Image (spheres, helix red, strand yellow):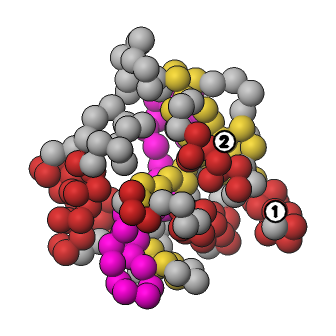
Amino acid sequence: MAHRAPPHLDTPATLRTERLVLRPWCDSDRAPFAALNADAETMRFFPEPLTRAESDALADRCQALIAMRGWGFWAVERQDNGAFIGMLGLHVPAPDLPFSPCVEVGWRLAREHWGQGLATEGARAALAFGFDRLGLDEIVSFTTVTNTPSQAVMQRLGMQRDVATFEHPALPVGHPLREHVLCRVLSGDLANHRSTS
C-alpha cells in the first residue's frame, strides 16, 4: 500500500472522550510523566526506565511534534479531576522499520490507571482523528511479543495482527524485547468495527 505524508494542521488538536482529554503538553506534566517513566513495572516492555532528563526530553519531543504537525503523542488527563495519566496518540515512527513509512497509534499510561479501559478509549479517539481528520488509509501499532496487555488493546480496537513478527532495529540482536508484533487497521475496517462493537 502506498503511503502519503499525513497533513499538518494549522492549530494543535485537542481530543475529548467520555473520560479523557488528549491535549498539548505543559510544564506541569513533567513530574508525573517522569514518575511514570521511572516506574519499573510500567516500563517492563521497554529497554529500561528513563531518567528525569530523558523523560523531560521525550516530553519536549512530543510537544515539538504537536506544535509542528498539530497532532502527535498527546498528554492525557482525566476529565473528572484533571490528573495527568500518561501519553497517547499518533506518531510517524523511524524510517528504518520494515513497514515504514506509516503512522502508528501508541500509548503509555501510569500503572494506577491500568485496567479501566482508558487506553482503548483514548486510542479509539486517536484512530478516529487519524482517519477522519488526517485522511489516513491505514494506522499501525506494534509492541514486543511479550506485551500481551497492549496486544489486547490492539485487538479491542479492531486491529489485525500480521502473521509474521519483526525484529526492532533499535534493539541489539539477542535482546529479549527485540521481537515485535505488528497490528494494522484500515479506515474502512475501523468504521465496520465501530458499528459492531
Tell me the tag on residue 193: 1
Identity of the amino acid at label 1?
His
Tell me residue 29's x, y (percent): 24, 70
Tell me if residue 167 is in the magenta stretch. Answer: no
- Residue 87: quadrant of the picture: bottom left
Identity of the amino acid at label 2?
Cys
Can residue 135 be seen in the rendering of this structure? no
**What secondary structure is marked by label 1?**
helix
| CA distance for labels 2 and 1 | 15 Å
Q: Which residue is mark 2?
A: 183
Q: Quadrant of the C terminus?
A: bottom right
Give the extent of the magenta segment: 73-101
Figure check: 76 above or below 154: below
Sequence-first tag of 2 and 1: 2
Tell me residue 98's x, y (percent): 56, 27
Give whichever of 70, 104 is nearer the camera.
104
Residue at x-position 21% and y-position 57%: 34
> Crowding at label 1, few (<14), some or many (≥20) Cα neighbours within 10 Å?
some
Tell me if residue 96 is in the magenta stretch. Answer: yes
> Crowding at label 2, few (<14), some or many (≥20) Cα neighbours within 10 Å?
many
Name of the residue lying farthest toward the bottom: 80
Q: Is residue 29 left or right of residue 75?
A: left
Residue at x-position 58% and y-position 24%: 166
